[in-house]
Amino acid sequence: MHSSTVDIVIPLGSTSKYANFELRMALRSIHKYGRHCRNIYLVGSDIPTWVRNCRIIEYPDHHRHNKDANLIDKLLAAAQLPDLSRKFIFWSDDQVALHRFSAVALQPAYNRRSAAAFDRQRIWHRRMKNTLEYLQKHGCSIKYNWDSHLPQIMDKELFCRIMSQVNYTAEPGFCINTLYFGLLNTPPVVEQSQIKKTIERGEFLTALPGDKLFLGYNDSALQGNLAGLLLEHFPHASVFEE
């Protein structure tokens, strides 16, 4: 049985190349399309002064070369609060909703890339290889991963329990979603490409994808015309902005 509402937790890094444009778009998308959302928690050390109607958790980055350890720290800071809903949505600022969604009905989404798809040349690949090797040692599947770059629903008690048993600060670290959902042996029901479009280059698009629930992007994507399309789609300030 679903809870009637859930909270959303957005960890923020210490710097933003685009003056927190990504956070504005994420908040506007939640305001426009989110249903059954309760509170939004922003966790970081440099929360924009224009933010309104969000719960702020001041938390700095402690790990210079381990991004996921910083994410885990920040989710733990939120998960240990009694007021945070038992189920919560882990949302990154570079993710936006493109259609109406019910926060309580979201299902975990997996990424079909298996362990064979990753090498050790890139730091994120090393982190994923380390995560999948850890899962394999614990008898969990490595046929896919869970770092799908879209909002994921989690259980705060399970999250705290799992992370307390893992030395996630040791480099190269662990990929947060794959570690969490992998150790829970979560069944692969929703594949990311069914509900999310990924943009990671400075493309020039004719429109935002109309057939996807979510959009995930990175800094490089904003070198094309994505920023303009997002502003056209979300032209008005949300209740979370000054």
Image (cartoon, rainbow, N blue to C red):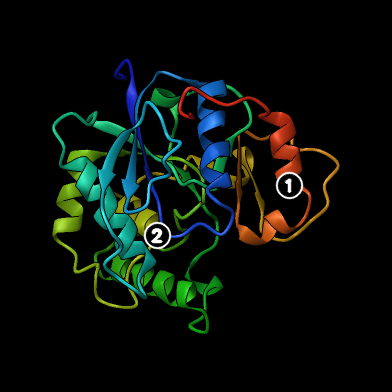
Q: Is residue 90 above or below residue 126?
A: above
In the picture, the disc for residue 14 is 2
How much space separates mark 2 and mark 1, taking CA atoms?
A: 23 Å
Residue 174 in view of the camera: yes
Q: In terms of secondary structure, where does tag 1 sit? A: helix
- Which residue ends up furthest to the top in the rendered image? 4
User: Which residue is the site of mark 1?
Assistant: 226
Residue beneath the point at 26% across and 53% down: 59
Q: Is residue 77 above or below residue 40?
A: below
Where the N terminus falls, by quadrant? Answer: top left
Residue beneath the point at 18% across and 28% down: 83
Query: Do the numbered discs 2 and 1 sit on residues whose CB atoms are within 8 Å?
Result: no
Q: Measured from the top left, where is residue 5 in percent x and y?
A: 33, 19
Apparent side of residue 57 relative to residue 113 in the rendered image (left or right): left
Q: Is residue 73 above or below residue 53?
A: below
28 and 69: which is toward the camera: 28
Look at label 1 and name its amino acid.
Leu
Q: In terms of secondary structure, where does tag 2 sit? A: loop
Residue beneath the point at 47% across and 71% down: 124
| For marks 2 and 1 on the same chain, the one whose residue lies earlier in the sequence | 2
Near mark 1 (Cα within 10 A), the count class, few <14, some 14-19 or many ≥20, is: many
Q: Quadrant of residue 141?
A: bottom left
Apparent side of residue 78 relative to residue 212 in the rendered image (left or right): left
Look at label 2 and name its amino acid.
Ser
Q: Measured from the top left, where is residue 58 in percent x and y?
A: 26, 48
- Which residue ends up furthest to the right in the rendered image? 206
Q: Measured from the top left, where is residue 11 in percent x and y?
A: 37, 48
Residue beneath the point at 48% across and 74% down: 125
Q: Quadrant of residue 152?
A: top left
Residue 183 in view of the camera: no
